[in-house]
């Protein structure tokens, strides 16, 4: 299937490793040109070297609005447009409510909600003007079924889901599609840090791979997803039990 991604310009945040890197490589494999960012310069440079298409790599802290805006401006200067924007950021620490502080909550909102908002503010005017765009947020299955001990993620990422649904309605008339992809337990460094072993809870009986997750994001970024907007889709091997 031709996904229609050749020479599309794709921004992928937090893409030096993990899910973001898998998405960037997946888009590049379909011929998209990439703009990638992360906080760590060395890992970012190594990932950029793996991308087979034209690439812009810039160190960015996605919790800082000026850095996100400057990154998108650099993309516009280099490529002239932004077709696809995949928002992404690491997750807040695992805590129960009684163990959280106000600073924990502010950090979680900055990391998972405000970073998404900054990218949306930066790219949507361009997509609206060109009357084509894809905004895809990477959140968590926690927005569909809260995960015990991850209250910061459960709450902050659920706000992203509400933002996605609202933006999808507002920008649909301009052929700009906005969707949310919700990874479950996936073989990333974050899963190692959480030190959990959930295989028995997953109907497929195994942990997912970043590449399996990326396949859905690549499809949603493509021409073939032209009638899908405003949805939150789990990629979790059946872990989510809600209808």
Image (spheres, grey):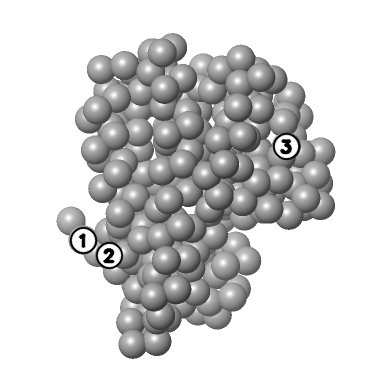
Q: Label 1 crowding class (10 Å Cα cut-off): few <14, some 14-19, many 20+?
A: few
Does residue 41 show up? yes
Question: Which of 226 and 167 lies nearest the eye of the viewer?
Answer: 167
Q: Position of residue 128 (x, y in %)?
A: 38, 18
Q: What residue is at 55 percent from the left and 80 percent from the top?
A: 195
Closest to the observer, 70 or 33 = 70
- Is 7 above or below relative to 138? above
Q: Is residue 119 above or below residue 238?
A: above
Q: Earlier in the sequence, mark 1 or mark 3?
A: 3
| Residue topped by disc 3 | 57
Q: For the residues carrying marks 1 and 2, which lies nearer the camera in this image?
A: 2
Name the quadrant containing residue 112: bottom left
The first of marks 1 and 2 along the sequence is 2
The reply, left or right, for residue 216 in relation to residue 188 is left
Q: Residue at x 60, y 27 (%)?
A: 73
In primary-sequence order, the first of circles 2 and 3 is 3
**Circles 1 and 2: CB distance less than 8 Å?**
yes
Callout 2 secondary element: loop
Q: Which mark is residue 145?
A: 2
Q: Which residue is mark 1?
A: 242
């Amino acid at each position: 299937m031709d996904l229609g991604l050749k020479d599309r310009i794709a921004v992928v945040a937090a893409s030096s490793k993990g899910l973001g890197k898998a998405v960037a490589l997946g888009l590049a494999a379909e011929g998209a040109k990439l703009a990638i960012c992360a906080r760590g310069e060395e890992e970012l440079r190594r990932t950029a070297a793996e991308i087979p298409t034209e690439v812009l790599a810039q160190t960015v802290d996605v919790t800082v609005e000026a850095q996100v805006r400057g990154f998108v401006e650099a993309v516009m200067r280099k490529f002239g447009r932004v077709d696809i924007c995949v928002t992404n950021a690491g997750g807040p620490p695992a805590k129960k409510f009684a163990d959280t502080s106000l600073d924990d909550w502010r950090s979680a909102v900055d990391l998972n909600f405000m970073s998404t908002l900054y990218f949306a503010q930066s790219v949507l005017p361009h997509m609206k003007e060109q009357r084509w765009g894809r905004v895809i947020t990477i959140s968590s299955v926690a927005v569909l079924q809260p995960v015990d001990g991850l209250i910061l993620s459960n709450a902050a990422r659920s706000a992203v889901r509400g933002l996605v649904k609202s933006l999808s309605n507002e920008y649909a008339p301009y052929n700009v599609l906005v969707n949310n992809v919700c990874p479950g337990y996936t073989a990333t460094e974050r899963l190692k840090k959480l030190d959990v072993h959930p295989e028995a809870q997953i109907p497929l009986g195994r942990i997912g791979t970043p590449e399996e997750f990326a396949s859905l994001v690549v499809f949603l970024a493509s021409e073939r997803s032209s009638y899908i907007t405003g949805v939150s889709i789990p990629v979790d091997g059946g872990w989510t039990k809600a209808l």
